[in-house]
Amino acid sequence: MGGADDRAPRTTVVLSRLPATGPLYRRALRGVLPGGRRDPTLPATTLTVAGVQVDRGHLADYDRVCGFPLTERLPVTYPHVLGFPLALRLMTAPDFPFPVTGLVHVANRITAHRAILAGELLDFSAYAERLRPHDRGRQLDVVLVASVAGAEVWRGVATYLSRERGDGGGARRDEGDRPATPAATARWRADTRVGTDYARVSGDHNPIHTSRLGARLFGFRRPIAHGMWSKARCLAAFENRLPDAYTVEVAFKLPVPLPGTVSFTRLSDGGFTLHDSLGRPHLAGLVR
């Protein structure tokens, strides 16, 4: 499954500007209404947009919400939110095989080839690949690439799960023995505003993060934090000790309920975890 999608020739669609996310989310919400079956193949389309400029006010707001210091260097997670409207346009297109509001972001990998400065103009491209089976449904990757003057400087791969095997969502726990609770490097209080503030700066207004009712529709008792907020908050805790070029990948485990308290642990091998007071993992990450 998915092999034919990856080998098919791609059609490049050039946009004149980044799309507005509001109309895309209204389209996404219509996509969860009952209707005909979708074609279970990925679109052979690459969306591109050139000359995206960083709004320094928006960058400062993002830094505040995620805990980064304000500098001329973009946080490694910032191009994800800057180019997110392009990825959302791809995932809300009629030929995308799954309703975007029902997808679960289960893993994320970012590669920074060098530091990116706030004054640089970025060209973005987005496409989907690697539709594959999973024991709870199907997975796929949405790839977002940022380039400067024709050279790739940043690449993000977001892995999503479409649940199709009777998985009720919510707080599904990892099976097996629970590991010992790691010693916390830091503890953070994530209040309800984390969901709405991150939605505002990221453009990701999925109601599972901002509304108690929206969360309940997808099996959660209360809103949950965006996974990319959790990843960004962890990387902010490295306090500028990261190199200019590196790859950071995370696997999202249990959701972070809002409000809640989370513990961050930085490991000696480049790994890091975010977990609750009982040691249950919210995410596990690695910098290399």
Image (cartoon, rainbow, N blue to C red):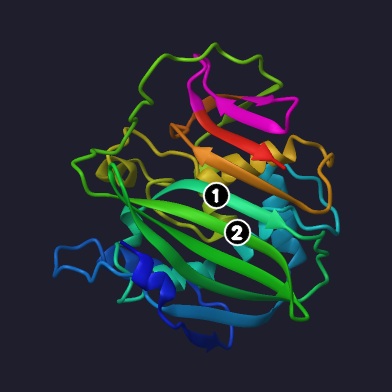
Res. 186 image quadrant: top right
**Label 1 crowding class (10 Å Cα cut-off): few <14, some 14-19, many 20+?**
many
Amino acid type at mark 1: Asn
Q: Secondary structure at mark 2?
A: strand
| Left or right of residue 263, residue 69 in this image | right
Q: Is residue 269 magenta?
A: yes
| Left or right of residue 247, residue 168 in this image | left
Q: Is residue 76 magenta?
A: no
State whether residue 102 is above or below residue 277. below
| Left or right of residue 245, residue 82 in this image | left
The quadrant the C terminus occupies is: top right
The residue located at (50%, 26%) in the rendering is 281
First along the sequence among labels 2 and 1: 1
Q: Secondary structure at mark 1?
A: strand
The residue located at (51%, 79%) in the rendering is 47
The quadrant the N terminus occupies is: bottom left
State whether residue 205 is above or below residue 166. below
Q: Position of residue 214 (x, y in %)?
A: 32, 47
State whether residue 271 is above or below residue 240. above
Distance from label 2 to label 1 (Cα)? 7 Å
| Residue occupied by mark 1 | 108
Amino acid type at mark 2: Gly
Magenta residues? 264-281
Q: Position of residue 169 (x, y in %)?
A: 29, 38
| Residue occupied by mark 2 | 156
